[in-house]
Image (cartoon, helix red, strand yellow):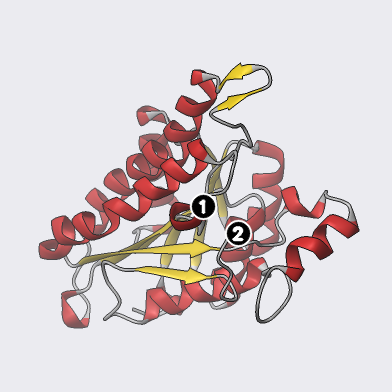
Amino acid sequence: MHLSTTAALITGGASGLGEATARHFASEGAQVTILDRDADRGAQVAAEIGGNFAQTDVTDEESVAAAVRHGMDKMGKITATVNCAGIAYGIKTVGKDGPHPLDAFQRTIDINLVGTFNVSRLAAVEMAKNEPEPDAARGVIINTASIAAFDGQKGQAAYAASKGGVVGMTLPMARDLASTGIRVMTIAPGIFMTPMLAGLPEEVQQQLAADVPNPARLGDPQEYGRLAGFIVEMGYLNGEVIRIDGALRMR
């Protein structure tokens, strides 16, 4: 597969890692359809890169089905899906205000894990209809986990559980979809300069960067986008999780 002939759905494409991926793919000639809840920002990014936009709730089956249909209508095919939509709460299992709110835990699982699977399964139906490329390739799904899946810190029970689920379904999904020529990969980012982190004081950003062994800085979302692009084009990558974290191990 080549980025220049890729037709991609990118969830969370209105900001952060998803936006960087959408911009990188488009710059390499790919067709891009952004799926995001933020209608204004999503439409703006899509217009800037010459792509398409579908306002989407990844946890809702009909919303995602409509977005997939929109992507098919606009691009004619879907050969790649990159799932970047996600949320994070910082809440301890038991804190000063009592136990972790169950609705916050459920919402994190619903968006980060169930939403990822929801988009993947519906996109895979369309990918399976593609004419096979060399190596019988019909498409690739790239999901986003986190190093919190392996090194979850205090207050990350919900987030780490959701991302651990994404890691855990990588290999079985790859096996499920092998006969259709669809690969499944997961990227596990470390600490990246997303809008959430960009809003923190400079001193806090520097402290976070200092924990990264080499290079001692926060990740650039463009690096995530370039890695996603590499995965699309490297057809022998399948069923694996790639950490991109500067050797950071959280504690």
**Which quadrant of the view contains residue 130?**
bottom left
The residue that appears at 55% across and 52% down in the rendered structure is 52
Query: What is the quadrant of the N terminus in the image?
Result: bottom left
Amino acid type shown at disc 2: Leu
Asked whether residue 70 is in view, the answer is: no
Write down the residue under mark 1: 84
The residue that appears at 89% across and 52% down in the rendered structure is 201
Residue sitting nearer the eye, 84 or 10: 84
Residue 45 drawn at (x, y percent)? 68, 54
Q: Would residue 199 be found to the left or right of residue 55 on screen?
A: right
Write down the residue under mark 2: 17
**Which quadrant of the view contains residue 62?**
top left
Q: Would residue 74 be found to the left or right of residue 140 on screen?
A: right
**Which quadrant of the view contains residue 232?**
bottom left
Residue 2 drawn at (x, y percent)? 39, 80
The crowd level at tag 1 (other Cα within 10 Å; few <14, some 14-19, many 20+) is many
The residue that appears at 61% across and 32% down in the rendered structure is 91
Q: Would residue 204 be found to the left or right of residue 195 on screen?
A: right
